[in-house]
Amino acid sequence: MYQQDYENHLHDMLQNTSIYEPVSFNELNISVDKIKYSLHDHLMQGVIDEKTHNYLLVPKPRTPTIFGIPKVHKGLNPLKFCPIVVGAGGITEPLSKFVDHHLKKYVTSLPYVCKDSWEFLSALSIDVNNTNLLLATIDIVELFPSIPHTQGLDWFEEMLAIEAGLNNNLTNLIIEFMDTVLHNNFIFSNGEFHRQRSGVAMGAPCTTAYANIVLHKWETVHIHSTVWRHYIKFYKRFLDDICILWEGSR
C-alpha cells in the first residue's frame, strides 16, 4: 500500500462522527488543565498521597497519535483498519495504568474470560466429540469503540460495586479515572485534533479491563441469567471472540 493511500484510509476513519469528533487545540489544553487541577485537588484533600500524585501527573503531556493495522483477514475490498492509539506520554496514560493495575485481580477472576489460547484449551474439559453438541462462535464487531460511554460506565460501576471487593474510596477513584480516560481520548493525526466520543481507545492500558468488565455485565444479564442457559455446556470469551458449545435443538 502506498503511504498516501494509507493516510487517506486513516483520514476517512476519523471522519466517522459516531466515534470521533474534531476538536480545537484550545479544547485539548482546557481538558489537560482540568485533569491537572483535579489531581492537585485530590492531593490537597488527602484522596491521594504525594507519591501517587506525582505518578499520575504528566507535567508536559504529548497528544496521542493513531495508526491503523490492516484487517486483511476481513477482506481487501474494501480494506478495513484496526485503529490503535499510541498514548505514551499522554495526560491520561498514568490514570489508565492506575485503573488497569487495580483491576487485574478482579478481571482475571471472571469465570468466562480467557487470557490466552492455552487457558482456553485447558478449560475445554467437555467431550467435544459428543455428536449432540453444536459449536457456535461469535465475533463482536468493533467492540472497543462501540461501548457507549454512559451505559458502559454505569455497568462498569455496578460490577465494581458488586464483585470487585475494593474499598469504596478506591472504587470511586477508579470510576472517576475511567470516566476521565474515556472522555479525554484526544488524537493528533495529519495536523488535526480529534477526540474519540464512543468506546475506549485500543492501545490504552485499561482497554482490556474495561471492555471485559462491561461485557461481563452484558453476559450476566443476556446469557447466564436466561432460561436457556442450561443448554450451554461450555462458554468462554477472549476479548471480542466467544466460543459456545450448545447441547440441544438449534
Image (cartoon, helix red, strand yellow):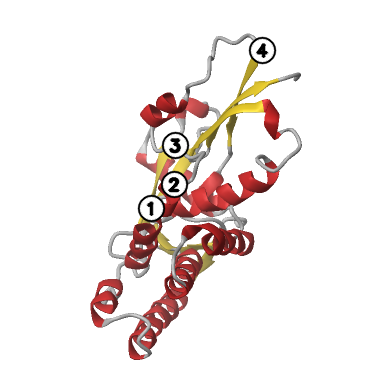
**Where's residue 222, x and y in %?**
69, 43
Provide the residue designation for mark 2: 109
- Evaluate if marks 3 and 4 touch, with contact meaning CB atoms under 8 Å apart: no
Q: Which residue is mark 1?
A: 105
- Helix, strand or loop status at disc 4: loop
Residues at circles 1 and 4 in contact by the CB criterion of under 8 Å: no
Nearest to the eye among marks 2 and 3: give it: 2
Residue 83 badge: none
Distance of label 1 from label 2 (alpha carbons): 6 Å
- Give how far across and how far down residue 10 sits, in percent: 46, 47
Q: Is residue 42 visible?
A: yes
Residue shown at 47% from the left, 43% from the top: 9
152 vs 165, nearest the viewer:
165
Q: Position of residue 209 (x, y in %)?
A: 44, 52
Residue 132's disc number: 4
Q: Earlier in the sequence, mark 4 or mark 2?
A: 2
Residue under pointer 3 = 114
Is residue 33 left or right of 154 when viewed as pictured?
Answer: left
Viewer-nearest of discs 3 and 1: 1
- Within 10 angstroms of label 2, few (less than 14), some, or many (20 or more) residues? few
Amino acid type for the residue under numbered disc 3: Cys
Please tell me how crowded label 1 is: few (under 14), some (14-19), or many (20+) other residues with Cα within 10 Å: few
Instruction: Identify which residue, 79 or 144, lies in the foreground.
Output: 144
Instruction: Confirm or deny contact between disc 2 and disc 3 (CB under 8 A).
Output: no
